[in-house]
Structure formats: structure tokens, C-alpha cells
Image: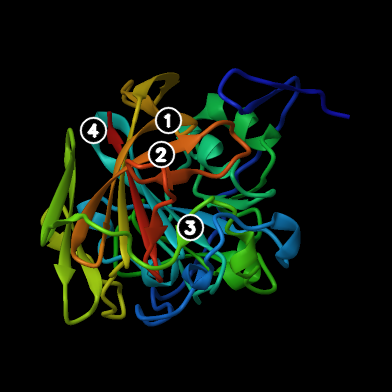
Amino acid sequence: MRKMVRNGRGGWTAALVAVTVTGSLMAGCTSGGGRADDRRSPSQSQSPSRSATASTGPVLAVKIDNAPDARPQTGLDAADVIYAEQVEGGLSRLMAVFASTLPAAVGPVRSARESDLELLRQFHRPTLAFSGAQRKLLPLIDSAPLVPEPAGKVPDAWYRGTGKAAPHNLYLRPRRLMDSAPGDAALTTGFRFGAAPAGGTPEASRTVRFPSARFTFTWSADRGRYLVAMDGTPTVTTDGRTVAPATVVVQYVKVTKSKYHDVLGNNSPFSESVGTGKAQVLRDGRSFDATWNRPGATDGTRFTAPDGTPMNFAPGQVWVVLAQA
């Protein structure tokens, strides 16, 4: 029996762990499926949170590469929530969370970070699909309250695409890991969906900058969605679908140095998603000031307006950019 103790960040450490990541991956194409961006999703709900016990299973979280050589990506349009977080060298990486729909393929898949483990504590034993991790982080992943799915653990779930060079060509077949999508009730993020609040400031475009990366969200009145560009490149999927969230959250968090480094010795930043801070919520072509609050690691994140009323998100996909406070 493995003994686990809780650490100061709401994560877990293990007394003894063995994690093996295999490298036998199947070759294949990069075609994938997704739903249209006007889909109705968890955003139908008016409640501020959902009960994990009401779902059919855990959400699937996938670490997604968004380096220029990884684009276009596959399956991003099907995600319910996409988190953008800072990694080594001021670059960025995505974590896509799937509950309503499982696309045929997702990727390119890349490695996990410590920040992912704190974010995922919001969900009940989520499945985390990733290509690997820094060696000293693997025990923490293994002992966290989630189901780790590193590349090769389920061999037929993974394949190498032919259109990109490694390491930007690793793809996941989600339906080989999960029998079915768990459903909206698994999205225990604390997000609230409903009618737009009063007020707000008209804003046609917002750019959020990391030290070496940037995200631009441009409102499309025709689509009723935000068009995403990463580092100045419009974000579309390999099958030509536009990635267009209905709500964009710029969540200002503390970004500190972790005890982990990449192979070049660059420190892996840690984005603290437990606590409270300022945020801007973009929906319906307007920007709304907000406060985010997540008291503990197992709590969802609540967003409130300056007067303390809950901040409603618009129906559809949500992007959360974890920006430096």
C-alpha cells in the first residue's frame, strides 16, 4: 500500500512510486473530429457548480502543444474548457478539458506540469493524458488524485502523425481511453452560465501576453464567438474548424518558480490557481471586471462582479488564460 501525504499546494507526494512511460506508438494520420462551435454545452446550466457524483465518469484533460511547429492542432474545437498556462522560457501550453464530447483525435500531446495537478483538483479523479513529464515530477503525478495516462500506457490510444516532426506529432484517440464522454455534470469548475450581466465595456479584441507568447481574442458578431490567434496565427484545427470560444477569462494569478526544470535547465513556472485575485471576463463583445475565488484545491473557481453578484459565462466553450498577476 502506498502512503501519501498532502503537500502545501493542495497536491500530494508519494513515499514510493514507479512510473514507466513507454515509447511504442502507432503511426497514423492526424484527422480528428469535433463539434461545431455553436454547440450547446455545459453552458446550458444556470447553476454555479455541478455535482461530480451526477456525472457518468471523470473528465478527460489533455496537455496540448501550441508551439508554432505543432499548429494546426486537432480536437481543440471539441473541448469544453481550455486552460492556457505559462511554461519554461515564457512560452505557453494548453490543457484541454473534455466532458460533453470526445473527439476522434486530440493533439499534438505534450508533457505535464505541476500547475496542471492543482488545476485538476477541481474535478473528481480526472483522467490526464500527457506525453511525459520531468522525471522528478512523475511521482507527484502518480500519487495525485487523478488517472494518469502517459503516452504508450494504452498503446492503441496513441499514434504518431505524419504531417509534423517529433515531438510535435503525438496524438491521442480519446475513445480508446474512455468508453464515452462523462457529460456536463463532470465539469465541477464552479463556472456559472447564463444571461450576460449588466454593464461591461465594449471591447472588440484583447491580447494577453506571456513573456514569449501571446493570445489574441477577437469578437465576431456574425459568429457570436471570439476568434483565437496564438502568436499572431489564427487558431484553426487540422480539419479547418475555427476555434471560437463563447467566453474568454483572463485570470490573474501568482506565477512563481517551482522546484522543477526542463532538460535545458530552465525553471518550470508554477501558476497558483488556488486563492483569489482579479480577472476580466470577455463575452458578447464586452469586457467585465471580476474577482476569482477558489478557497481550496478541491473547490471550483467562482467569478463575481464588483458588486459581489455571480458572473455568468456565455453558452459554449470557455478559454481561461492564467496570466501573471
Q: Nearer the viewer, residue 116 or 50?
A: 50
Which residue corresponds to mark 1? Answer: 276
For label 3, the crowd category at 10 Å Cα-Cα, with few meaning under 14, some 14 to 19 and many 20 or more, is: many
Coloration mode: rainbow
Name the amino acid type tagged 3. Arg
Which residue corresponds to mark 3? Answer: 192
Q: Earlier in the sequence, mark 4 or mark 1?
A: 4
Left/right of residue 15 with respect to residue 305 in the rendered view: right
Q: Check if mark 4's residue and mark 1's residue have beta carbons within 8 Å.
A: no
Dot 4 falls on a residue whose secondary structure is helix
Q: Check if mark 3's residue and mark 4's residue have beta carbons within 8 Å.
A: no
Which residue corresponds to mark 4? Answer: 90
User: As displayed, is residue 36 above or below residue 25?
Assistant: below
From mark 1 to mark 2, how far is it between C-alphas?
5 Å
From mark 4 to mark 1, how far is it between C-alphas?
23 Å
- Give residue 292's mark: 2
Dot 3 falls on a residue whose secondary structure is strand
Left/right of residue 241 with respect to residue 139 in the rendered view: left
Query: Of circles 2 and 4, which is in front?
Result: 2
Q: Residue at x 22, y 56 (%)?
A: 199
Dot 1 falls on a residue whose secondary structure is strand
